[in-house]
Amino acid sequence: MFDPAIAGSLPKPAWLAETEKLWPQWRAEGEALATAKLDATLLWIKLQEEAGLAVVGDGEQSRQHFVHGFLEQVDGIDFAHKVEMGIRADRYKAMVPQVVAPLVLKGRVHEAEARFLRAHTDRRIKFTLPGPMTIVDTVADRRYGDRVEMAMAFAELLNREALALQADGVDIVQFDEPAFNVYMAEAADWGVKALERATQGLTCKTAVHICYGYGIPANLDWKKTLGEQWRQYEQVFPALAKSSIDQVSLECYHSHVPPDLMALLGDKEVMVGVIDVASDQVETPEEVAETIGRALQFVARERLIPCTNCGLAPMRREVAEAKLRALGAGAALARSRYGS
Ligand code: ZN
């Protein structure tokens, strides 16, 4: 009960990549880089275990960015000629690659790091992939001319990699869909369907992470425009409740999301964000336990998974480490407080 997990990403050590950046440059190349990525993965496996997390991830140490890490293994995408595009309904500009031909997976995307993760921990392991709708919102389309059709094409590729991850021993495959909080009607309409296509045939747990983004300035400015109550989840949660997806990761602590929206998820397992990723202030175990207590009004305790609001990638490493420990200690405190 209250088995803690993280949303996904963790900071890269200074010897692996530039720090406190969303698109960091690697510090090495070739073999040396491949080794450094796995060394960093091992470091974070150990730190997650020590913090008391029940589910362990690779901290996304092997990818530069959560979307482009996948796209680099897809044929039909032109990375040589990136174009500037407004993404997440123009919240920020990014240089994005272009889809120019039918999409085909070149081969495995995350085999090395998934097997490495499996080999180095006995805990349950989670692996994250970008969701189809978020991918569609992070590339320029010069081929399909239709967002839904392109999302379904990406979903097929994601499904192949997800099935292979399951065969590698992954217990939970999670898709990150921050775009669900931006295009709410489309998310409820076809975003969830694309997600289900991506999880087709999986017998391991499936999850979706929906957030308000990393604690970067563009996101903090955007959040200021969302008003007193953030009700974005209200449209997509009922669609997810009816879907085949097992777990939903959402923001809670320090967000303006009305906690009663969690009740819209029906019998899903809920990864409740009890750690703020937009502040360096480290939560106390008491604060974490209190957030869990509030969420218990709307989520049954056997379905509640204490989690971070989002990834911790752009944070300072020592802050992220302290937040992992707060998450583990807070979950333990909640177990003693609400466990019986
Ligand atoms: Zn997130």
Image (cartoon, helix red, strand yellow):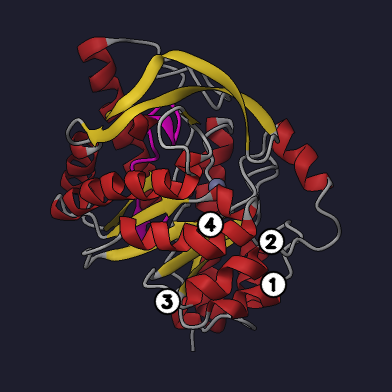
User: Counting other residues with Cα less than 10 Å from the Cα at mark 1, is it few (<14), some (14-19), or many (20 or more)?
Assistant: many
Characterize the local packing of mark 2: few (<14), some (14-19) or many (20 or more) Cα atoms within 10 angstroms.
Answer: some
CB under 8 Å between discs 3 and 4: no
Amino acid identity at mark 1? Pro
The tag on residue 327 is 4
Who comes first in sequence, dot 3 or dot 4? 3
Mark 2–mark 3 CB contact (< 8 Å): no
User: Pointer 1: what residue?
Assistant: 259
Which residue in the structure is indicated by mark 3? 1
Which of discs 2 and 4 lies nearer the camera? The answer is 2
Decide which of tag 2 and tag 4 comes sooner along the chain.
2
**Residue marked by disc 2:** 232
Residue 241 in percent (x, y) is at 49, 76
- Asked whether residue 63 is drawn in magenta, I would say yes
Q: Nearer the viewer, mark 2 or mark 3?
A: 2
Res 304 seen here: no
The residue mark sitting in front, 1 or 2, is 2
